[in-house]
Amino acid sequence: MKLARVLLLAALVAVGLPVPARAGMADRAGSTFALMANDFVTAFRPVEGLVVSLEGLEIFLDVTEGAGAQVGQEYTIFRKGDAFMHPLTGRTLGRYETVLGYAQVVRVYPNFVAAQFIPAGDAPRPRAGDGARITRARVRVAVTPTLDMTSARADLRRVPFLIAAALEGSKRFLAVDPLAVSDMFASGSVRVEEMLARPERAVRSARHLDVAGWVVSMLIERRGVTYLDVTYISAITGNALFSRRLPLVAPNATEEQRFPWEPRPED
């Protein structure tokens, strides 16, 4: 069996087809993302605070490092309005809110953060006491097809599905169907590279999917080591807010066993 397997691999290489080991690259990428998924969850966990002051386009929030503040977070800045009541009981149900803009954290201090402020249209300018939050609702994201910047020519079509499944499993994110996202890029109207290099395209394309951000993954090589690099891009500004890079996990004996009924590679 081992000899037959060697002959089969040699034949695949001879005709220029990707060998099964390259198909296993997708599994390795998925396993690698699983190691960094918690970092994404931590960066986007629910946080609430208040605006302390605004100087030009820099806004200061009373969110502390201990409360989970970190560079790359994106807060919604809002102002509370009049209360609204239950029509029968007269009980206060909540308050109307006006979204004033968004704040992307650029520096973190022990007792506050400094952020870049992005106004929301013609909304009023923020003032001390206005609210700031990362929503408690699940963050809706789109996972792009994976860019292969290596020479491996691996089959990475399953990687966005693996990443989306990991994000969904965290209960913090809601991932758009990766098939719908890949169809958008397959049409040629937009390229994955543009999500990274052209903020205006990232913002415009996000409107079609109604998402808060893009999750862009790529494989890169550095000194013989292959890395998975994953970046979160804001749908508000198109700016890259958060990124993680890890070496691909080591291959294992089950990489090529795609289904339970398949024989193990060493058989």
Image (cartoon, rainbow, N blue to C red):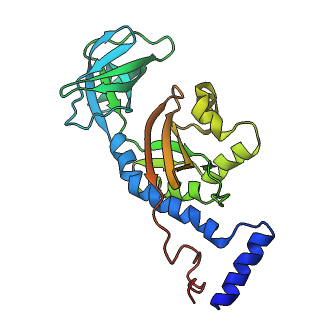
* Residue occupying the point 39% across, 32% down: 72
Residue 85 visible in the picture:
no
**21 or 102, nearer to the observer:** 21
* Residue occupying the point 49% across, 10% down: 122
Q: Is residue 181 above or below residue 107?
A: below
Answer left or right for 157 relative to 219. right
Residue 22 rendering spot, x and y as whole percentages: 63, 66
Answer left or right for 183 relative to 176. right
Q: Is residue 6 above or below residue 228?
A: below
**124 or 7, nearer to the observer:** 7
Q: Is residue 120 above or below residue 152?
A: above
Q: Quadrant of the N terminus?
A: bottom right
**24 or 6, nearer to the observer:** 6
* Residue occupying the point 28% across, 18% down: 60
Answer left or right for 146 relative to 39. right
Residue 87 rendering spot, x and y as whole percentages: 35, 30
Q: Is residue 261 above or below residue 215?
A: below
Residue 93 rendering spot, x and y as whole percentages: 30, 32
Quadrant of the rendered image containing residue 67? top left
Residue 125 rendering spot, x and y as whole percentages: 39, 9
Q: Residue furthest front?
A: 223
